[in-house]
């Protein structure tokens, strides 16, 4: 296990939420499982008409190194979907089998920090600039650097307050909206990782966003307050702590999760909710109504994977796992992993002897161990996570359904096959 993530010991309790006793979860660990170098509190409102987010954000960054930190570097992933000049989109016309060349201006996405300052210090908004250290493409705005007026000293915790705005794109590379379904992934300004590099120098590991790589971030605690229209059913990383109806057609939900490297969430008015539990783990399946009959298959495969991995790898340390099954029109947001939240994909009437549904949910859940806990650098060694996950996916499916009865084929081929149908 990566030294940034230390031990396994989840808690599980019943929380009283909004006056109702729900089979929810307690997200607070008795003992931290990581150094918690990067911690986030985000308060946001979703405008469903404009497809925009308005947010305030607090970052608490602890310098765990022996060297002073003189600038911040942050991922600004949504800017990869700003236009065709980003390094992510440049040089291609198709992503996941869909062309993006005919998009209207309001179908693109972006993120912009309007103000940033260090608590108790001067405004730093004038110190921001986009950098392109990987490929020199000045049209790319996926990494932002903020020069600090004074360094963050070794052992010091600095607090930064941000105000920002984002426009969600029509679904592309999983992030975005399809009609009234949304997936919010890699959607907020997030610090890179301050670490010692191969040359023994402390620096930011914060690469630009490319099609051939995925993600890398530090462990921390997330408190996210999401205000959205009452019509939406919502799922998110971590545990729901509170839910408040604002009396103006919106509801604010507060989610909390500890010792994770990211936070994702999804909303859709028509989700049906299926809940279950495996030992101390609360399971929440948000499934499109046309797929609801497949819910027991998802839950059976997921609980089998939890048991198998506890026996052969280690205990799942988090108190919850949320599974998002998108509607057919939002399927391009499926088949991906985020801490304590995964997206899957299936079809109406999937035959029971074709176990793509099961293998996909197992595959994405296994990522919780390798993407989520080992947290290898998916930007520099993208093969590591997928390699281990595919290996354990096949072992789990064979153990669950029998080697001669399990679904054969490489998991990535299955993923690609589903996406290329559209």
Image (spheres, helix red, strand yellow):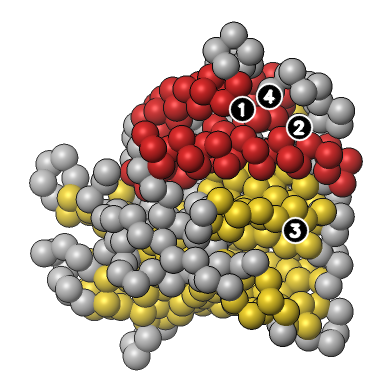
265 horizontally vs 194: left or right: right
Check the image and report above or below for 363 versus 373.
above
State the residue position of label 4: 356
State the residue position of label 3: 267
Residue at mark 1 to residue at mark 2: CA–CA distance: 11 Å
Q: Nearer the viewer, mark 1 or mark 2?
A: 1
Asked if marks 4 and 2 touch (Cβ < 8 Å), the reply is: yes
Q: Which of marks 4 and 2 is nearer the N terminus?
A: 2
Q: Where is residue 204 in the image (x, y as percent from the top left)?
A: 28, 54
Tell which residue pokes out farthest to the bottom in this image. Answer: 120
Asked if marks 1 and 2 touch (Cβ < 8 Å), the reply is: no
Residue at mark 4 to residue at mark 2: CA–CA distance: 8 Å
Q: Residue at the spot x=85%, y=59% of the render?
A: 269
Check the image and report above or below for 4 versus 385.
below
Q: Which of marks 3 and 1 is nearer the N terminus?
A: 3
Residue at mark 1 to residue at mark 4: CA–CA distance: 5 Å
Q: Residue at the spot x=59%, y=9% of the render?
A: 404
Front residue of 156/139: it is 156
| Quadrant in which residue 414 is drawn | top right
Point out which mark residue 359 bears: 1
């Amino acid at each position: 296990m990566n030294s940034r993530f230390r031990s396994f010991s989840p808690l599980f309790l019943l929380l009283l939420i909004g006056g109702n006793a729900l089979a929810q979860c307690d997200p607070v660990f008795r003992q931290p499982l990581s150094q918690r170098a990067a911690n986030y509190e985000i308060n946001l409102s979703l405008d469903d008409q404009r497809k925009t987010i308005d947010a305030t954000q607090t970052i608490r960054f602890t310098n765990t190194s022996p060297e002073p930190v003189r600038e911040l570097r942050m991922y600004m992933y949504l800017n990869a979907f700003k236009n065709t000049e980003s390094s992510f989109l440049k040089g291609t016309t198709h992503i996941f089998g869909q062309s993006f060349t005919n998009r209207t201006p309001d179908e693109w996405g972006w993120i912009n920090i309007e103000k940033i300052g260090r608590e108790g210090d001067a405004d730093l908004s004038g110190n921001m600039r986009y950098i392109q250290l990987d490929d020199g493409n000045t049209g790319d705005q996926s990494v932002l650097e903020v020069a600090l007026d004074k360094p963050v000293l070794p052992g010091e915790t600095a607090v930064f307050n941000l105000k920002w705005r984002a426009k969600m794109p029509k679904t592309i590379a999983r992030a975005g909206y399809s009609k009234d379904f949304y997936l919010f992934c890699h959607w907020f300004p997030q610090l890179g990782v301050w670490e010692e590099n191969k040359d023994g120098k402390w620096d930011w590991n914060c690469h630009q966003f490319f099609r051939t790589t995925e993600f890398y971030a530090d462990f921390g605690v997330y408190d996210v307050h999401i205000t959205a229209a009452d019509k939406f059913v919502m799922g998110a990383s971590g545990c729901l702590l509170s839910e408040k109806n604002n009396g103006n057609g919106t509801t604010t939900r507060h989610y909390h999760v500890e010792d994770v490297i990211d936070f994702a969430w999804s909303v859709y008015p028509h989700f049906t909710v299926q809940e279950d539990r495996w030992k101390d783990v609360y399971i929440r399946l948000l499934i499109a109504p046309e797929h609801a009959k497949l819910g027991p298959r998802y839950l059976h495969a997921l609980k089998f994977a939890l048991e198998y991995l506890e026996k052969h790898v280690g205990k799942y340390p988090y108190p919850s796992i949320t599974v998002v099954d998108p509607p057919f029109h939002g399927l391009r947001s499926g088949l991906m992993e985020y801490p304590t939240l995964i997206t899957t994909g299936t079809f109406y009437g999937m035959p029971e002897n074709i176990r793509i549904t099961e293998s996909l949910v197992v595959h994405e859940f296994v990522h919780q161990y390798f993407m989520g806990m080992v947290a290898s650098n998916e930007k520099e060694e993208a093969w590591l996570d997928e390699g281990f996950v595919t290996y354990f996916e096949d072992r789990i499916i064979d153990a669950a359904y029998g080697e001669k009865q399990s679904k054969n084929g490489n998991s990535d081929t299955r993923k690609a096959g589903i996406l290329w149908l559209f």
